[in-house]
């Protein structure tokens, strides 16, 4: 059976997200809506951001329709996995060796860094990580709402990754201050330890003290968050792991940078 496909092939950037690749293909063909492309691929989802966690066969159909190399898309696909720990069922997403809680991914909102888009106009994988309020490249506060019309940015319609789909205005850089310089190294370490970009995580773990070289990604992320919770003043004692993205932005930013800093000095940092 022949399938309708878009006309031009598109190259995937090394850190590009799959919903970002989808809207770039849709925009290049002036199609405006993502749904017809998903339908052509036989994919029945109502929330297009969820293409990041499609099953392998469905992603193959999508790659065919939008003319991306299927292996490249598959390399950054998140695999949905259900685990049961201490009597509680957790929904996780595996990116190779990096195992994230599903609740730590934001597949509903299109979060963007307009400053990074000025360098390259593609949607980055770290912007799907809801533990990261700032872009780890530009250190700009991520934007998820159009300042002109105040509507949320999403994935259903598109005039481009950096354009509001409602009023068609280009989204300007965030008015919030950049992440302070003294926090950037630790913030980037946390971003790499929870990164879906192939190979970033293993390089980041190698840079940690040797006592942590065999520790898995889910444990490292949990350690960083738990330690970060305890280091806040007042100490955060009653937040469940899956609810960390709901913390106020300044608190969450302090949690992940403090936690990453302590991993870097593990275990002697606690003595000081
Ligand atoms: Zn708008």
Image: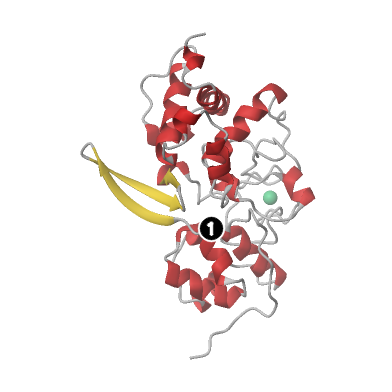
Q: Position of residue 64 (x, y in %)?
A: 56, 77
Task: Name the residue furthest right.
Answer: 118
Which quadrant would residue 165 be assigned to in this image? bottom right
Callout count: 1
Whether residue 15 is visible here, answered yes or no, is: yes
Q: Position of residue 27 (x, y in %)?
A: 69, 67
Q: In this rendering, is residue 38 above or below 155?
A: below
Q: In this rendering, is residue 265 above or below 163?
A: above
**Chosen colour scheme:** secondary structure
Left or right position of 246 against 239: right
Residue nearer the viewer, 220 or 150: 220
Q: Where is residue 67 in the image (x, y as percent from the top left)?
A: 62, 75
Left or right position of 139 against 232: right
Task: Name the residue furthest front.
Answer: 210
Q: Position of residue 244 (x, y in %)?
A: 44, 32
Which residue is found at the position 38% from the left and 55% from the top?
Answer: 80
Which residue is found at the position 60% from the left and 81% from the top?
Answer: 5
SS at mark 1?
loop
Task: Name the residue furthest left.
Answer: 87
Which residue is found at the position 44% from the left and 22% from the top?
Answer: 227
Residue nearer the viewer, 179 or 73: 73
Left or right position of 254 against 50: right
> Dot 1, how many residues are within 10 Å of its Cα: few (below 14), some (14-19), or many (20+)?
many
Which residue is found at the position 53% from the left and 72% from the top?
Answer: 62
Whether residue 171 is visible here, answered yes or no, is: no
Task: Name the residue furthest top.
Answer: 272
Q: Does the residue labelled 1 lie within 8 Å of ligand 1?
A: no
Which quadrant would residue 180 be assigned to in this image? top right
Left or right position of 88 against 74: left
Tell me the residue that label 1 is attached to: 76
């Amino acid at each position: 059976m022949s399938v309708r496909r878009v006309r031009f092939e598109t190259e995937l950037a090394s850190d590009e997200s799959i919903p970002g690749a989808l809207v770039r293909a849709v925009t290049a063909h002036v199609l405006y809506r993502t749904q017809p492309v998903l339908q052509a691929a036989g994919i029945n989802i109502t929330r297009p951001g969820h293409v990041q966690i499609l099953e392998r066969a469905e992603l193959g159909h999508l790659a065919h329709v939008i003319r991306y190399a299927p292996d490249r898309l598959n390399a950054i696909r998140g695999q949905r996995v259900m685990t049961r720990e201490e009597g509680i069922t957790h929904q996780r997403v595996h990116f190779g060796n990096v195992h994230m809680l599903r609740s730590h991914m934001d597949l509903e909102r299109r979060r963007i860094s307009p400053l990074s888009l000025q360098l390259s106009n593609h949607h980055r994988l770290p912007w799907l990580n809801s533990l990261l309020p700032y872009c780890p490249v530009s250190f700009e506060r991520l934007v998820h709402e159009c300042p002109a019309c105040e509507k949320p940015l999403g994935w259903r319609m598109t005039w481009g990754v950096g354009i509001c789909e409602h009023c068609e205005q280009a989204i300007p850089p965030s008015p919030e201050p950049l992440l302070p310089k003294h926090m950037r190294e630790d913030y980037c370490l946390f971003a790499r330890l929870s990164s879906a970009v192939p190979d970033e995580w293993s390089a980041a773990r190698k840079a940690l003290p040797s006592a942590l070289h065999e520790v898995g990604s889910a444990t490292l992320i949990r350690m960083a968050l738990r330690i970060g919770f305890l280091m806040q003043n007042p100490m955060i004692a009653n937040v469940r792991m899956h609810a960390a993205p709901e913390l106020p932005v300044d608190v969450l930013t302090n949690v992940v940078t403090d936690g990453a800093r302590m991993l870097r000095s593990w275990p002697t940092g606690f003595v000081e």
